[in-house]
Image: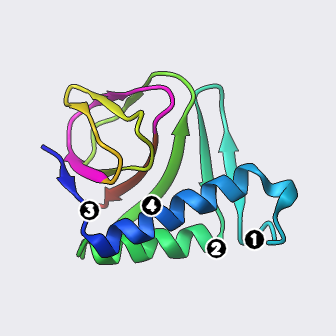
Amino acid sequence: MSQKLSPDAEAIRQKIKAIILEINNHENSTRTKEELSILGTTESDITYGGTLLRRRVSDLVGKMNIAEDYILTVTHFLKPTTIRPSKRYVIALSDEVIITPGGKLEEGSYTLMQDEFDISPGASVVFVTLKV
């Protein structure tokens, strides 16, 4: 079951989307690689990073009142991908997020997953994986 982000969290999510766009168009950016970067690319996904993105995602998690210890990942999926079981929040950054089982995760919404699931190509998400 998904939930909408609060207005404050949604404003931060919009900033995260803008940062990803800036990373993808890095040749037009005046920011440093430390601020904006692609951490890794595989045939199935692109993982984003940098100090600016990490700060904004931490702000988003703070607005969601997630007090547990966690690992943050911002990823765009290029093809269908199976995500291993772990307790994690999935926050939709794009409108193409389909989770199986579970269905479409609307942009600006999030859900808590614990079991293995598949995520659709074209999906951009923030994973907040809780450490256990």
Give the mark nearer the N terminus: 4 vs 3: 3
Query: Whole-Å distance between the Cαs marked 2 and 3?
Result: 23 Å
The amino acid beneath tag 1 is Glu
Residue located beneath label 4 in the image: 72
Magenta-colored span: 109-123
Give the mark nearer the N terminus: 1 vs 2: 1
Q: Residue furthest left?
A: 1
Residue 52 rendering spot, x and y as whole percentages: 62, 73
Residue located beneath label 3 in the image: 5
The mark found on residue 51 in the picture is 2
Query: Whole-Å distance between the Cαs marked 4 and 3?
Result: 17 Å
Residue located beneath label 1 in the image: 34
- Residue at 34% across, 55% down: 129
The total number of labels drawn is: 4
The amino acid beneath tag 3 is Leu
- Residue at 66% across, 66% down: 50
The amino acid beneath tag 2 is Thr
